[in-house]
Image (cartoon, rainbow, N blue to C red):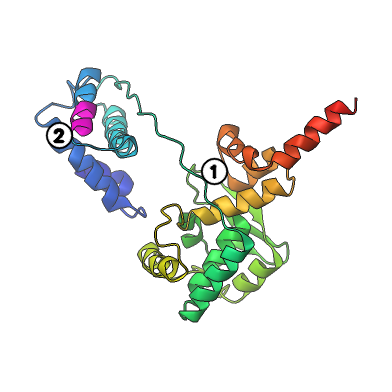
Amino acid sequence: AGEVYDRHWRGCKDGLGLLRNAEDVCDRMGSVSVTKLDERNIDDLVLDLERAGKANATINRRLAALSKMLQHAYRRRYIERLPVIERKREPEGRMRWLTKDEEIRMIDKLRAMKLDDIADFCIVLIDTGARTGELFKLQAKDIDLDLRMMYLRNTKNGKSRAVPLTSRVVEILRGCIRQTFLFDFTQDSLNYHWKKMKFLIGFGDDKEFTPHCLRHTCASRLVQKGVDICVVQKWLGHTSIQTTMRYAKIAPKNLADARDILESH
């Protein structure tokens, strides 16, 4: 686990969390040698996690850590084959997005809390659909205010993408373009202040009201306005169209319009 952390996870946004997952896997697997680890050992690991009451999503995070360690071992020729790792099925969570009224309440409360930088950060998330980690890595060189484009290079899937900027995002970024990194607070700071804000506006019990729902907000607004789903996929940087298709169900009017076109023929 330590070798994988030093080579792959050190410096990552949640590097220590990934290391803890890996260490838990190693503890549960005990004295099993990596050279002899096979699918039966993995089944035993999953069973142990299930008996401990771990949710499928938690089990999958442990399996992802194990997969990374095994891939590292395979590339270093510590092992001759990669065992097959079968992920657990996870229930599809509710896609939470903000109404315009909820957005206004959120932004107004953040500004009242003297957190203008976080309020601006949230507006950029809503209007670009970027992930929080992508914005934290954003540098001045990644912004072209004349073309009104933002270039995300350090993305989750490793593929760069360009995102057009709305007028209000252009004005926000114009104010911090002189900094190397455009936003200088941390993910921990964002999470801390977000939690305080959500309680103050009455969403304390809403588990889906997280910074990630701002990405859903961008996607849902694009779909509801009739933007082609393939364009939305490219905008959000989804590798698979199936991921983007989750938003299709929130645009019944657009689907009904498509039906009516067929009816007219």
Badge 1 amino acid: Lys
User: In the rendered image, which quarter contains the N terminus?
Assistant: top left
Query: Mark 1 and mark 2: span between their CA atoms?
Result: 35 Å
Q: Nearer the viewer, residue 211 or 169?
A: 211
Seen at 68% across and 39% down, the residue is 229
Residue 128, above or below 25: below
Task: Give the vertical position of 89 relative to 111 (above or below).
Answer: above
The residue pinned by badge 2 equals 28
Circle 1 Cα neighbour tier, 10 Å, few/some/many (<14 / 14–19 / ≥20): few
Residue closer to the observer: 79 or 246: 246
Which residue in the protein does label 1 denote? Answer: 159
Question: Is 154 above or below relative to 39?
Answer: below
- Give the extent of the magenta segment: 45-51
Q: Is residue 263 visible?
A: yes
Image position of 67 (left or right of 208)? left
Quarter of image, res 52:
top left
